[in-house]
């Protein structure tokens, strides 16, 4: 979180806000992102970041996108950090221990980041439609 707060103040952060690891919907489906999304929407995880919600048609979509970007990059930073810890533990303790850490890391950091990327793509389409529709 600290690293993300420092990174927000840089020009590099703007380029990160348009990051897309997996743009293909079929690949997202293949890795199970749909099921992960279901878990987030239907369990206690849905209460974690209440800033990322479209409450009504007057909601400022740019603010939601900014919050999504912050969440996405925070999870990516966490993923990289925990990956280094898992590699270190694989060498110093046991490869199975490091693999266990990585398994959890994928579901607690990588998948949330990928989900935010998918949601940002959907939100960008909505913002574009709203802009186009609103100018007629």
Image: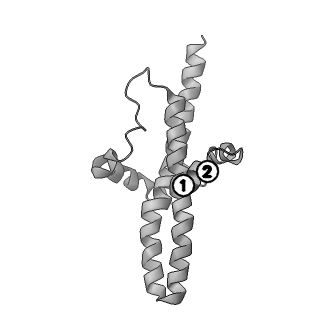
Q: Quote the CA–CA distance across marks 2 and 1.
A: 6 Å
Asked if the residues shown at circle 2 and circle 1 are in contact, with their CB atoms under 8 angstroms apart, the answer is yes
Q: Which mark is residue 2?
A: 1
SS at circle 2 = helix
x then y, percent, for residue 42: 29, 48
Identity of the residue drawn at 52% across and 53% down:
74
Q: Residue at x 56, y 59 (%)?
A: 77
Residue assigned mark 2? 6
Relative to 9, say whether 90 is above or below: below
| Residue 100 percent location from the top left of the image | 42, 77
Residue 116 horizontal side relative to residue 6, left or right: left
Q: Position of residue 46 (x, y in %)?
A: 33, 46
Residue 24 located left or right of residue 95: right
Q: Residue furthest right?
A: 11
User: Crowding near pointer 1: few (<14 within 10 Å), some, many (20+)?
Assistant: few
Neighbor class of circle 2 (other Cα within 10 Å; few <14, some 14-19, many 20+) is few
Residue 10 lies left or right of residue 23; in this view the side is right
Reply above or below: 65 against 85: above
Residue 52: x and y in percent read 43, 38
The answer to whether any part of residue 31 appears in the image is no
- Residue at position x 54%, y 87% from top? 91
Quadrant in which the C terminus appears? top right
Where 127 falls versus 38 (above or below)? above
- Depth check: give the residue in front, 83 or 126: 83
């Amino acid at each position: 979180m600290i690293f993300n707060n420092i990174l927000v103040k840089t020009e590099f952060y703007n380029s990160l806000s348009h990051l897309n690891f997996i743009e293909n919907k079929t690949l997202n489906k293949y890795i199970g992102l749909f099921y992960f999304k279901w878990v987030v929407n239907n369990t206690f995880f849905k209460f974690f970041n209440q800033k990322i919600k479209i409450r009504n048609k007057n909601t400022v979509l740019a603010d939601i996108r900014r919050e999504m970007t912050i969440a996405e990059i925070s999870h990516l930073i966490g993923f990289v950090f925990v990956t280094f810890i898992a590699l270190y533990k694989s060498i110093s303790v046991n490869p199975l221990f490091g693999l266990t850490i990585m398994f959890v890391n994928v579901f607690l950091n990588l998948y949330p980041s990928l989900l935010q990327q998918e949601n940002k793509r959907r939100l960008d389409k909505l913002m574009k439609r709203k802009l186009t529709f609103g100018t007629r």
